[in-house]
Image: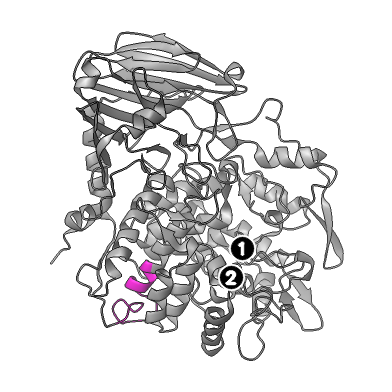
Amino acid sequence: MPLERRTLVEAHNPKVHAYDPDAFLSVGNGNFAFTVDCTGLQSFLHPREGKTPLCTMSWWGLHSYQGKENARYDLLTLKQYDCDGRKVGYMTDSTGQEELFNDLRVNPHRFNLGRIALKAKDTDEETFVTSLRQIDQCLDLYSGLITSSFVYRGEPVRVQTLCHPTQDQISLSVESPLIANGILSVVLHFPYASHTISGSDYTRDADHSSVLFSETQFAHTIKRSMDSTSYDVLIKACTQCDMKQIGRHSFELSSTNLVLQASILFKKSDDESSPTVDSFARTKSLSANHWARFWTEGAFIDFSLSTDPRSGELQRRMLLSRYLLAIQCSSETPPPETGLTCNSWYGKFHLEMHLLHAAHFALFSQAELLERSLHWYKHILGGAYERAKSQGYKGARWPKMTDPSGNDSPSSIGTLLCWQQPHPIFYASLLRKTHPRSTLLKEWIDVIEATAAFMVDYLQYDEGRDCYVLGPPVIPVQENHRPEQTLNPTFELSYWRWALQEAVSLLKEAGRSVDEHWLAVLDKIAPLAHDGNAYLAQQHCTDTYGAYAYDHPSLLFSLGLLDGRDVDRNLMNNSLDKVLKHWKLNELWGWDFPLMAMTAARLGRAEDAVDLLLMDSPKNTYTANGHNAQLPKADLPLYLPGNGALLLALALMAGGWRGESSHAPGFPREGWVVRTENLKRFW
């Protein structure tokens, strides 16, 4: 019998009954997102540090400060590292060049395109919001509609908020007698851009411009300009509305009717397309159809028949994570770690996290949502070739912290990180397994070949051991290791072996010849380092479970995220035991718990797998809106890699993996009833 998907989804619609900056809701379409407070709009900006800001963000919404538009990497002095007897320069040292180093990190940055708020006449924002009564807000996951109801001055107010599924448009409807009598209106505010978490600077009015053009009473355009950045805001009033400018960067929509409806579309000024601003009614219909298809066509996991008291919370986390990643992480480019909600690391994205953001889409039978961002790798392939060449390597070296240009960002850690390098091969292998008719696989052969060519050349030959090794200098997933002293980090070494084997298979399948040198190198990659009882973080880290027992326990991930083809299961079982006993688990990041759960599942430790998924730990917190907050970090009130890793783990635990025939092998037999539809099997 088919699962009652709609009933299961709607049972976990997030509901809000107070102004709560930890429970702001968002609508979006993957390329664009709009986050609201309990009014259904962005009516009060909470000043407290660590609270989610209210932003309107798009994948293209990037800005550089004046005079910083052209990245002057040629002026940056590189720190030289010894690499197998030769010097290789990395952007790791800011000494004596702090301003340039910081400029290259901060620019370009994502920014808040604009704020859309409810305004109460003769009342400041905070007083307005704190005066609301009977707040009742709900996000209908099955239609993408946020409905917000409350009472103000004794009168009911009902706000409906939607995002258009295919363009950067918000549609809203405000219904209240307070609209008709002029007490409430809708106001658009435009800040200057900022690299901070809010993407907004409301103190620099003189440094940008907002110019209103009214074509008709119902159609208006606001032209925005900041330094070299410009964009247009198209407003279509769907009911009888007046629009006027009330401040240098503020505009008011008001109506004498009981209902004020409007659609607001954001577009780059150089975008030659001419999008039609759809009405609220049409947007509502398009949104409902879009989300019904999303929930119907993808895979599904149902825990509702389980008796384990934690099953409801796991169901909630899964469903809200799927929604959040669909609206935040299915863009034309990889997403930042806080998606399109606010700025983390200036709104730049980290390529090592791309896997955790988006790989789950393929396993949940929605590979097209993964493919959207994969085309970008071809766009930056030329720069990746240049990066490898400048360091003396063959092939293409992918950046770490980057933006749509594909430039890398200076960092004492990031430029030496390497675990993002095999990711394109991971994606290609995942598509071949889950979506073999993908046209991207054929288009991506050059990407796979260039990735593998760098990986082969990056390895160093150890003549004494007659094998190829990884590092130094290198910084592994567990970033607390010094690059000059790191040799053969366990996960990276395993990933190198796995990815090169997969690359050879993919290239041969595509009819490409494979360099014999690659095969010789692959045959002699060093074994994983261990002390006879458990795996080490890296070959020189004899105190793995002592002084280094904090940060990401990546030595476990070779059997979990990967299939463990080079892993001794007894050693890995002991390693998991020692991590659980000795590691500072409260310091783990949100995505560590699911990846550890994957290791436990593959080891047949289903109880541990579930315990790890739901471990009570600050950075494994999931707030009412489904976000994985990284408490107590004030700069990460949400953290989407945690949500994505959760979905990867659930796909493995419920869908199984190659060589495992039992149903839902990652869940205990007692207390858990796991029903699935269309879930793809992991490797």
The magenta stretch spans residue 653: yes
Question: Looking at numbered disc 1 in the image, what kind of residue is underneath it?
Answer: Trp
Sequence-wise first label, 2 or 1: 1
Three-letter amino acid code at disc 2?
A: Tyr
Residue closest to the eye, 19 or 3: 19
Query: Main SS type for the magenta part?
Result: loop
Where on the picture, by quarter, is residue 352?
bottom right
Left or right, residue 73 beside residue 592: right
Mark linked to residue 495 = 2
Instruction: Bin the neighbour count of mark 2 within 10 Å (Cα to Cα): few under 14, some 14-19, many 20 and up.
Output: many
Residue 363, placed above or below residue 144: below
Q: Residue at x 46, y 55 (%)?
A: 629
Residue 141 can be seen, yes or no? yes
Gap in Å between the C-alphas at discs 2 and 1? 8 Å
Q: Identify the residue shown where x is 62% and y is 36%.
A: 108
Quarter location, residue 31 = top left
Find numbered disc 1 in the image and state the secondary structure of the residue it sits on.
loop
Q: Quadrant of the N terminus?
A: bottom left
Residue topped by disc 1: 419
Tell me what residue is drawn at x 52 percent, y 50 percent.
Answer: 636
x, y (%) of residue 327? Answer: 38, 45
Give the image location of residue 174, x and y in percent: 25, 26
State whether residue 73 appears in this view.
no
Give the answer, above or below, for where 261 lies relative to 437: above
Looking at the rendering, the stretch of residues picked out in magenta corresponds to 650-668
Residue 51 left/right relative to 138: right
